[in-house]
Image (cartoon, rainbow, N blue to C red):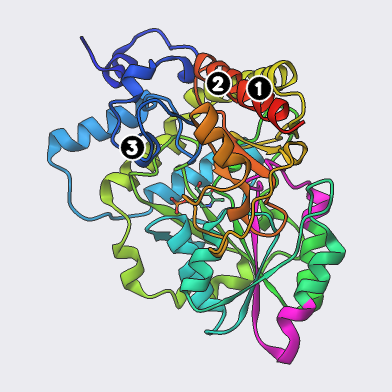
Amino acid sequence: MASPVAREARSPVPMANPLTQLSLAELRRRTSVKWRQYADDVLPLWVAEMDVPLAAPVAEALHDAVGRGDTGYAYGTGYAEALADFAARRWGWSDLAVDRTALVPDVMLGIVEVLRLLTAPGDAVVVCAPVYPPFYAFVSHADRRVIEAPLGADQRIDVSALGEAFRRARADGRRAVFLLCNPHNPTGVVHRRDELEAVADLAGRYGVRVVSDEIHAPLVLPGARFTPYLTVPGAEDALAVLSASKAWNLAGLKSALVVAGPHAVADLRRMPEEVGHGPSHLGVIAHTAAFRDGGEWLDRLLAGLDHNRELLGVLLARHAPTLRYHRPEGTYLAWLGCTALGIDTGPVGDEPGVVTDIAGPARLFLDRARVALSSGHVFGTGGAGFVRLNFATSPEILTEAVTRMGRAVTEHHASHG
Ligand SMILES: Cc1ncc(COP(=O)(O)O)c(C=O)c1O
């Protein structure tokens, strides 16, 4: 029988929803962390990998490269050109200049290299908490200090908290960066243009440089619109990091791009040449094909994710109505408030940032429901009492997972009054 990838790659008829192509048995044959971290009776809805076959144009580009034995080092600006065309088509970002880009191994290593260009050891990096745990881990590992600016109660950027964090970061005249997550992981908030303008204004006033992680940008769902940070007035000295990795499920095919605003070009030029040795040639080939030819596949994925986003709301209302669900505007991540369970996350010991650490509600769902979610406490301040659920899976798996979670919640409420 043809593998699902081959079926998708060869099919003359465009397939429908990429999220409905693979059975649980097929997915369990995968060897990536999502499928191997937990035992076989656990449904893994944690790390940001999607349960999809490769998009046909990406699979074809990789097959062709392997057929040619084209497995040397990466070269050229094809990835940046494909991204620039995609950005112009999708987001109206018409001045993404290829000569203001640099190829980096992946988004997080790209961010670290940009931090090295803009700051010195001991300088501060401001993040809006709760946020993607590696923002803490990579920043600390690069000897920079994390300063948190908590999100508002509406889970959107709180400008006054951000201003206070910028003030602290710049005390003693030290250099500082704001590491923006645009769209925001884990809440799925897509920052509006007016919000980003307020960020740029604040950053300009305090002399804080902005680095915008836009890895989830292609995953903005119907109803919201992505604003590239570099298109906002006042963001000319910012840098953005983009990649096809999340939207086309290419995390194992390493590469990403840093894009400098016009006033950050001199900074980007100081990027050491050896950083460009990190991305994989096959990664660059795959990411280029995704941005260049993967639009139709992406549209089908977004329709599937939109469906799952609604389904998740229905399932939670039916099986676990005490959990709070903030419908995400983008990403395939749902940030579920579980404080009604009354589970104390307890002394967790670890710093935020350890993605595999499980405590509090996530521990209940793992032990009692056999559903693996990301534990909220590793996302920093404001994360305890939440879990992050990855809904980039089939409606069947999502239904089974939430049904099991609902049973665990019911048993928990019954045994705890
Ligand atoms: C906001 C954010 N940045 C970066 C990454 C990781 O990207 P990469 O694997 O390219 O370092 C992720 C992965 O989920 C993410 O959500």
Given the image, on which type of amino acid does mark 3 rest? Arg
- Res. 308 in view: yes
In the figure, 43 relative to 162: above or below? above
Look at mark 2 in the image and give the residue it sits on. Answer: 398
Judge: label 2 CB < 8 Å from ligand 1: no
Helix, strand or loop status at disc 2: helix
In the picture, measured across the screen, residue 72 lies left or right of residue 351, that is left
Given the image, on which type of amino acid does mark 1 rest? Leu
Residue at x 36% of width, y 27% of height: 54
- Is 348 colored magenta in this rendering? no
Query: Is there a contact, CB below 8 Å, between mark 2 and mark 3?
Result: no
List x then y, in percent, for residue 303. Answer: 60, 20
The one nearer the camera, 156 or 240, is: 156
Look at mark 3 in the image and give the residue it sits on. Answer: 36
In the figure, 330 relative to 398: above or below? below
Viewport quadrant of the N terminus: top left
List x then y, in percent, for residue 102. Answer: 44, 62
In the picture, measured across the screen, residue 398 lies left or right of residue 72, that is right
Look at mark 1 in the image and give the residue it sits on. Answer: 312
Label for residue 71?
none
